[in-house]
Each structure stands twice: as structure tokens, then as C-alpha cells.
Image (spheres, rainbow, N blue to C red):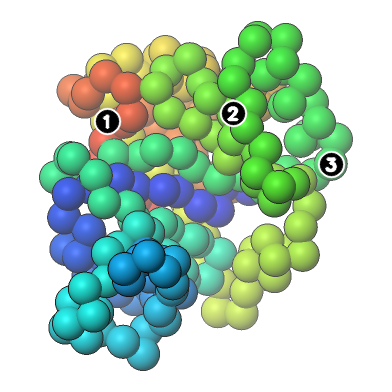
Amino acid sequence: MQLFHYHLVTSVVREVEARYLGKLAFELVARYGRVGDDTISYDAGLGWPELDAMDFKLRLSELERGAVNVVVQPGQWRLPRVDHFGLALDEDTFNEAIERAIAAELRIQSHGGRRTFVSTTSGFRLELHPPRDWIDDLLTHDNELRLAELELKTDDPAGKAAAVAQILGLEARDGTLDIGDAKVKFVPGGPQGRPELHGELFI
């Protein structure tokens, strides 16, 4: 089980994107959005001045470094909130997680067999992946960078951690879970629903 992806929602997409590109040395995979009625994506070859001149409307900005993939989406909160995080699982662990979600009567959304989202009882989602070639390629990336810790601020650390643990069959202690090589820590003082991104540690 490997935590490799998280999806942020913020009103300052360009500032958050710039932090990953500049300070953290991520690479831009693509910016996805619309020009008029056309759905379109652009890679790092075009900057924001050129996109603004085209009246490009951003839907998502995808960034990547090593074995870590981050998506930033426009939304209402200045401090980024986590809509979901993505996990790579083996076939058995994936099926067991889906069975737990069904037994708990949680909402499950499958998108064309490519991605499966499970809604927790705590206002955010998990994106679950069985073995896939593109994830294997990402996780075995040369010059590999991995996510060691993701710290999320919330109103209910124990409840948020328990909601994730229930689906994944893990044990949560003091708002903290070990997911593969990574640690997810829910800390107090944050909002209801989607937790705020409070800290990241990469190795």
C-alpha cells in the first residue's frame, strides 16, 4: 500500500502551484481546463501570461516529482484543503477495501475503471487504485522522491483517522495512520469536512 497522490482545493491556485514548482522542485505535468467550449490541456511550454491571453479557464493543475503526484484545483479556500488522497494497493488489498466500504454503506464511484473513489464519513474521499502500469512507473521513478508524512488540520483528528482506517483495515492511534511507508497525521484546529493541508515531509 503506497500513498502517492493528493488533491488540493484552493482559491490561490497559482501561488500554490508556484510553491511546488519553485520551492519543492516539482515538474508541471499539465494544466487542464477550457478555452471557450473546448476542453484542452497545456504542458509547461506555455506560461500563465500566454494562457491568460487565450482566456484559458483552469480546471486542474497537475504536478509531479519522483513518486509523488499533486493536483491543485480552484476552489473557495485560501488555505489548501484536501479533497482526497490516492493510494496504490495490490489486488487483494484493493478488493478488501471495497468490500469494507460496501459493508459500511459508503458511497463508491468508479470512473471508467481508471479510478475508484470512496467517500469517507468525514467529508473527504480516498482514491483507490489496484495495480496499474502507470502507477508502477511512477513509484519506481528514477531519482525517486517519496512522501514520508502528510499532516492535515481538522476539527476531529481521531474521527478523520478512524474513517480512513475503517476502509483500509488499518489501526489509527492519536489521529495518526501508517499507510505503507508514509504517515498521515490529523491534527486539531482545522475545519469541518475537507481537512487543511498543514504540512508535508518528503524523502
Residue 19 picture location, percent across and down:
23, 66
- Is residue 56 something that shows in the picture? yes
Q: Quadrant of residue 150?
A: top left
Label 3 packing within 10 angstroms: few (<14), some (14-19), many (20+): few
Kind of residue indicated by mark 3? Glu
Q: Residue at x 31, y 68 (%)?
A: 36
Horizontal side, residue 69 vs residue 197: left or right: right
In the image shown, does 17 or 33 lie closer to the viewer? 33
In the image shown, does 73 or 40 lie closer to the viewer? 40
Lower sequence index among marks 1 and 2: 2
Q: Residue at x 31, y 87 (%)?
A: 46
Lower sequence index among marks 2 and 3: 3
Against 180, residue 56 (above or below) is: below
Q: Quadrant of residue 12?
A: bottom left
Residue with the mark numbered 1 = 153
Residue 49 picture location, percent across and down:
16, 83
Q: Which quarter shows the N terminus? A: top right
Against 65, residue 71 (above or below) is: above
Residue 91 numbered mark, or none: 3
